[in-house]
Image: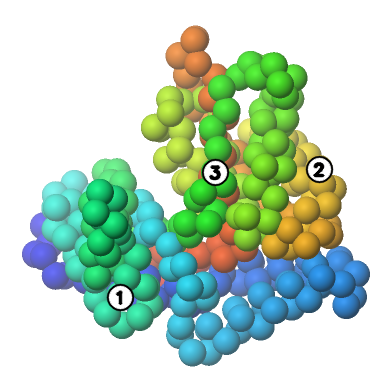
Amino acid sequence: MAATGTYTETFVELIRRASAELPAEVAEALRTGREAEQRGGLASIALNTILENVDLAREASAPICQDTGTPVVWVHHPTGVSTRAVKADFEAAVREATARTYLRPNAVNTLTGANTGDGSGRGIPFMHFEEWDEPRIEVRMILKGGGSENVGAQYKLPDGKLGAGRDLDGVRRAVLDAVVQAQGKGCAPGVLGVCIGGDRVSAFEASKRQLLRPLADTNPMPELAALEERILREGNELGIGPMGFGGSTTLLGVKIGVLDRLPACYFVTISYMCWAARKAGVSIGEGGELTWLS
C-alpha cells in the first residue's frame, strides 16, 4: 500500500506526454490523410496546419490544443493498493500539470460558472479502477476535449427516422448519422469509440475505453471487425473532411465494443475523439520502475 504522493510526479509526466505528444500512429494517419487529399485544397491545407502544430507542440512540450480536455483515466492495480491514495495522487498531478501549463485551468463550477483555477473539480479527473492479478499498476489516460465531447451521441434502437433496426446494420446507420450530425464541429478527422448495448451510463464509459485501442488493431470479433472497416470507409465517403472543409479524411479510425443489455433496451453509444487523439499510459512495477505505454 503506497503512501499519498508516491505517484504524483509520474502522473504529471503522464499528463505532459498526453497533452504535448500526439501518438505516432495518429500523426501517421494524419499524414496519410494529407496525401489522399487534393494538393493545395482546403483539406490538405488544414491537415498540413494540424501536422505543423503537432510538431511544434512536441518540440516545445506545450499542449497540442488550447482545449486540453478532461483527463479520463483507467487504473488496473493489484490487491492491497490504496485506490484512495492513487486517486489523490492523480488529482494532485492534475493541479501540478495545470500549474506547469501542460493543462489549462479547465474545470468550471457548473452552478456558478466559476473556474476552479487548478484544473480539478467534481468528477475531474474521471477515474475508473479495476483490480487484477498482475503485480504492477497500469494507468491509461485520454484527454477528452470539449468540442469532440459535444458531438458524442447515444441512439435508442429501433429508430424509425434512420430506418435502423436492432441489428448491426442499424448500428451502422446510427454511427454514420452521428458523423453527419457532427460535421466539422468535432474537429475532424476524428476517431470513433462505439459501444453496442449496455445501459446509458456503462455504455459511455465503454465507448471511451475503445479509444485506447491502437488505430491499426483488428477487432477480435469478426463481425465487429467488418463493421469497423465498413463504417470507416463509408464515413470517409461522406465528404465532410478535415475540420468540415470537405475531402476524404473524415475519420481516422472506428473502434467498436459490445456490452450485454436488457431486453427492452438497445443503445448505440458514440464517443467522438477529435484529431488531437491524446492518450498515454504507464506501467509501474513492484519496485517503482516505469514503462511508458503508447
In the image as oriented, which residue stretches furthest toward the top? 263
Q: Which comes sooner in the sequence, label 1 or label 2?
A: 1
Q: Specify the amino acid type for callout 2.
A: Glu
For badge 3, the amino acid type reads: Gly
Q: Residue at x 63, y 55 (%)?
A: 185
Residue 118 picture location, percent across and down: 24, 70
Which of disc 1 and disc 3 is earlier in sequence?
1
Which disc number belongs to residue 192? none
- The three-letter code of the residue at mark 1 reads Ala
Alpha carbon separation for disc pair 3 and 1: 27 Å
Under circle 3, the secondary element is loop
Give the alpha-carbon distance from disc 3 to disc 2, as whole Å.
19 Å
Residue at image location 74% in from the left, 72% down from the top: 46
Q: Is the Cβ of the residue at disc 3 closer than 8 Å to that at disc 2?
A: no
Give the image's coloring scheme: rainbow
Q: How many marks?
A: 3
Q: Position of residue 280 (x, y in %)?
A: 45, 65
Horizontally, residue 269 falls left or right of residue 2, namely right
Q: Earlier in the sequence, mark 3 or mark 2?
A: 3
Residue, disc 1: 97
Mark 1 element type? helix
Which residue bears the numbered disc 2?
A: 234
Looking at the rendered structure, which numbered label has been put on residue 152? Answer: 3
